[in-house]
Image (tube, rainbow, N blue to C red):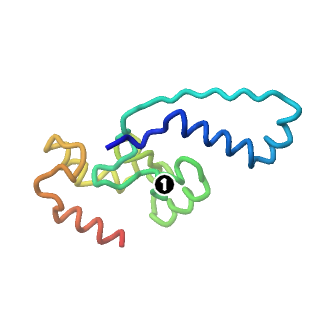
């Protein structure tokens, strides 16, 4: 099976499409020389923002509020009856986690078992993960 990573031909196609469709490019193309440079960098997946339970931290409202929406963070803090500092969260594996995530049983469990994700466990899905998933529905 081939990799889904970007390759040179993919990037050339995107640049060509931008040249054809972008209003800015259309205005500039006859007046300036545009040189496009890029570098394809292959890297492995990052676990920093992937929760041990399998959730993707950047899709969480607390993570989004922490990173880019201070007003939402204030509202969430009030809703959760917490301080803003207790509400801040930069992901499951960071030192800066919301009060709820600091007490996560799944993080402790994976650490004790030497696992990266709950899905690697022989007991998956355990009652704890079923409980969390039910709360999300």
Answer with left or right where residue 102 lies relative to residue 123.
right
Which corner quadrant of the image does residue 75 belong to? bottom right
Residue at horizontal 17%, vertical 65%? 127
Which corner quadrant of the image does residue 33 belong to? top right
Front-most of residues 38 and 121: 38
Answer with left or right where residue 47 lies relative to residue 42.
left
Q: Secondary structure at mark 1?
A: loop
Q: Is residue 7 above or below residue 126?
A: above
Q: Label 1: how many residues lie within 10 Å, few (<14), some (14-19) or many (20+)?
A: some
Q: Position of residue 92 (x, y in %)?
A: 35, 47
Front-most of residues 75 and 90: 90
Q: Position of residue 52 (x, y in %)?
A: 28, 49
Q: What number of labels is visible?
A: 1
Answer with left or right where residue 106 lies relative to residue 48.
left
Quickly name the residue at label 1: 83
Front-most of residues 106 and 102: 106
The quarter of the rendered structure image containing the N terminus is top left
Residue at horizontal 35%, vertical 55%? 55
Answer with left or right where residue 133 lies relative to residue 113.
right
Residue at horizontal 53%, vertical 33%? 8
The quarter of the rendered structure image containing the C terminus is bottom left
Q: Position of residue 134 (x, y in %)?
A: 29, 71
Q: Is residue 17 above or below residue 125?
A: above
């Amino acid at each position: 099976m081939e990799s889904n990573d970007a390759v040179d031909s993919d990037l050339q196609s995107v640049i060509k499409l931008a040249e054809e469709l972008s209003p800015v490019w259309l205005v500039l193309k006859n007046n300036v020389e545009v040189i496009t440079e890029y570098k394809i960098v292959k890297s492995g997946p990052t676990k920093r923002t992937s929760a041990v339970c399998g959730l993707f931290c950047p899709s969480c409202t607390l993570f989004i509020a922490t990173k880019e929406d201070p007003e939402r963070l204030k509202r969430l803090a009030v809703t959760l009856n917490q301080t803003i500092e207790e509400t801040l969260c930069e992901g499951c594996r960071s030192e800066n986690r919301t009060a709820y995530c600091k007490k996560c049983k799944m993080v402790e469990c994976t650490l004790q078992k030497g696992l990266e994700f709950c899905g690697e466990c022989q007991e998956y899905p355990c009652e704890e993960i079923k409980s969390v998933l039910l709360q999300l529905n």
